[in-house]
Image (tube, grey):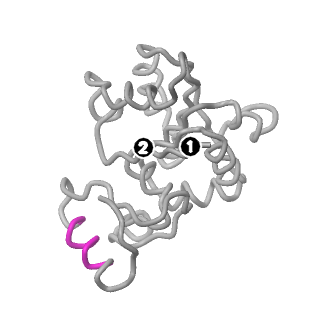
Amino acid sequence: MKKQVLAMGGGGFTMKPENLKLDHYLLSMTNKNNPKVCFIPTASGDDESYTRRFYSAYKKLECEASHLSLFSPPEGDLRDFVMEKDIFYVGGGNTRNLLVLWKEWGLDQHLYEAWCNGAIMAGLSAGSICWFKQGLTDSKTGKLLPLECLGFVEGSNCPHFDTEKGRRSSYHDAILDGLMIDGIA
């Protein structure tokens, strides 16, 4: 099975709702008509307005949209819910909280199984970092520090590399100091 991750540092429905080119591209990656897309807003604390923005954008696209809230989980088996989806789009927010909650619920393992079976993993900011072995995040202390992530993709990730002050130098320094492995920004 082909394993795909679309890691985004910006754009898409969350930042440019009038320009859904990245979202169209994500859907095209499935090579399916009407793919099943699941938005996971864990990193934002399952922010309802974020979820509404997802539905507002994705109702304009040819797909079957759903979301997964761990604060109000779906009825039935979580693994079954995950395994029937084609795409998982993870929103931004606190990467550390996302990882802790996913591991507690076993969602990390279900997503890995889905990915190995052809589901596409995508995300923005925290939703980008989470798929890599490591990420540079401010979710621990407010300072930019390395964080061990899921490891679906080898290497490290640093979204907002060229848009947020201090990201570029912090990422370079962490790699040069041996605190992080090479990656993409």
From this view, report whether residue 180 is shown above or below residue 34: below
| Left or right relative to 30: residue 56 | left
From this view, report whether residue 141 is shown above or below residue 44: below
Nearer the observer, disc 2 or disc 1? 1
Q: Name the residue under label 2.
A: 6
**Disc 1 secondary structure class:** loop
Total numbered circles? 2
From this view, report whether residue 44 is shown above or below residue 80: below
Q: What residue type is labelled 1?
A: Lys
- Residue in the image at 66% along x and 42% along y: 117
* Between 87 and 95, the one nearer to me in the picture: 87
| Left or right relative to 88: residue 177 | left
- Residue in the image at 35% along x and 34% along y: 14
Principal secondary structure, stretch drawn in magenta? helix
Distance between the alpha carbons at the discs numbered 2 and 1: 13 Å
Which portion, as a residue range, is magenta? 167-174
* Between 3 and 177, the one nearer to me in the picture: 3
**Disc 2 secondary structure class:** strand
Work out which residue is located at the far front of the displayed protein and give it: 1
Q: Where is residue 33 in the image (x, y as percent from the top left)?
A: 53, 16
Q: Position of residue 118 (x, y in %)?
A: 61, 39
Callout 1 environment at 10 Å: few (<14), some (14 to 19), or many (20+)? few
Quadrant of the image for the C terminus? bottom left
Residue 119 location, quadrant: top right
